[in-house]
């Protein structure tokens, strides 16, 4: 227990760029959050005025939260975390007050753990609209590759149009392919996430590299699923795609990212047109590695009967927490083109970008 603690000595301020390199380790050790410096950096670039820190006069950071304004209608809140020894002392309330001042009358969404639902409702949030599971576990890559081979053998027996899967390094793809991915992402969300994605795709030189193969020494790796509109056959590379983009001959059918945290890797996001494509993306992302790795992913509740979810459980991932989507009860009418139907938001989502609303 902290003696002589006075909430009046706590200051809530905005993130500064220097804070992104000095986020305390206790934030990353909170079980189930799956948070990384890369995620905070991306949010900071979306709306630096919506990133808040609570600190003591000694400059010790004891709390953090997000309240990002995405446009004139929408805002999202996430990563409300207070250091364990300072909880239930009013720190979270201070952070939330500043967040609500910032988002003003926008339609504001959060995700909540079950124990906070009642408190959130009292503060003006809606009843939960849907929920998601946070899965964490060690994956044996050798066993995973056997699963991938079995699935691919079955797939080869079918005569469907060929779907291609290629790994890519997000910071190395050109602008034209990046725009294709951003457009696909926007179709899923109903909002443009250009700034967030560009920042998420950046290479992080400060993250320690591992000692496996060349590709997984990167801090972020992507996997793209697509189909050509003509009869082009393998082998396919990123260069092949680029040579056909001018005539718009490819249809993106899904993509996934895996990026490194202080401990383990997060798969986020994972979007696909159906569960078999999602499963292929997940397996192929992990098959890049050659060892046992720690992985986490946030899966919407409506996907727990999918083959992907079953395979993840068989590979050793366990549900460590459930989060619930909630919205502020303000009756703001969303702008033209904004679709807030939860089923629309998650129909192609197999792994959420974060635990935060509107960045599904």
Image: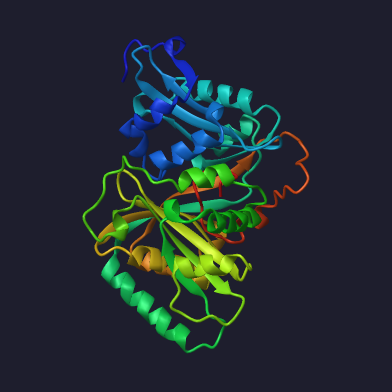
Tell me: 303 left or right of 64: right
**Would residue 297 be seen by someone viewing this image from the given angle?**
no
Give the image location of residue 192, x and y in percent.
63, 47
**Would residue 70 be seen by someone viewing this image from the given angle?**
yes
Q: Quadrant of residue 29?
A: top left
Front residue of 256 and 142: 256
Give the image location of residue 61, x and y in percent.
38, 23
Q: Residue furthest left?
A: 211
How many callouts does the rendering have?
0
Give the image location of residue 47, x and y in percent.
56, 32
Give the image location of residue 185, x and y in percent.
59, 55
Tell me: 103 left or right of 131: right
Front residue of 195 and 43: 195
Q: Quadrant of the N terminus?
A: top left
Residue at figure coordinates x 63%, y 68% from the top left: 247
| Residue 266 to residue 147: above or below | above
Residue at figure coordinates x 58%, y 36% from the top left: 118
**Picture colour scheme:** rainbow
Front residue of 70 and 244: 244
Residue at figure coordinates x 39%, y 26% from the top left: 18
Residue at figure coordinates x 25%, y 65% from the top left: 290
């Amino acid at each position: 227990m902290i003696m002589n603690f006075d909430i009046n000595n706590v200051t809530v301020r905005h993130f500064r760029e220097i804070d992104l390199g000095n986020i305390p380790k206790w934030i990353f050790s909170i079980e189930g959050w799956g948070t990384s410096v890369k995620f905070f950096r991306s949010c900071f670039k979306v709306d630096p005025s919506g990133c808040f820190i609570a600190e003591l006069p000694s400059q010790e950071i004891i709390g953090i939260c997000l309240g990002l304004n995405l446009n004139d209608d929408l805002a999202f809140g996430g990563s409300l975390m207070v250091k364990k020894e300072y909880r239930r002392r009013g720190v979270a309330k201070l952070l939330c007050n500043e967040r609500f001042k910032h988002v003003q009358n926008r339609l504001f969404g959060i995700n909540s753990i079950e124990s906070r639902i009642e408190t959130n409702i009292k503060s003006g949030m809606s009843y939960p609209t849907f929920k998601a599971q946070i899965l964490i576990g060690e994956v044996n890559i050798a066993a995973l590759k056997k699963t991938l081979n079995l699935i691919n053998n079955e797939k080869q027996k079918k005569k469907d149009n060929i779907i291609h899967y290629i790994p890519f390094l997000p910071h190395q793809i050109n602008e034209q392919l990046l725009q294709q991915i951003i457009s696909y992402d926007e179709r899923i969300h109903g909002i443009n996430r250009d700034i967030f994605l560009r920042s998420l795709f950046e290479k992080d030189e400060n993250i320690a590299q591992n000692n496996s193969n060349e590709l997984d020494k990167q801090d972020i790796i992507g996997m793209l699923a697509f189909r050509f509109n003509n009869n082009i056959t393998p082998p396919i590379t990123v260069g092949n795609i680029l040579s056909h983009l001018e005539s718009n001959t490819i249809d993106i059918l899904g993509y996934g990212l895996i990026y490194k945290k202080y401990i383990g890797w997060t798969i986020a996001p994972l979007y696909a047109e159906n569960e078999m494509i999602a499963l292929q993306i997940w397996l192929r992302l992990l098959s890049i590695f050659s060892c046992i790795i720690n992985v986490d992913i946030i899966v919407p509740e409506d996907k727990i009967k999918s083959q992907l979810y079953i395979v993840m459980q068989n590979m050793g991932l366990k549900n460590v927490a459930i989060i619930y989507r909630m919205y502020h009860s303000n009756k703001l009418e969303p702008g033209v083109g904004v679709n807030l139907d939860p089923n629309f938001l998650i129909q192609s989502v197999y792994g959420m970008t974060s635990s935060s609303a509107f960045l599904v």
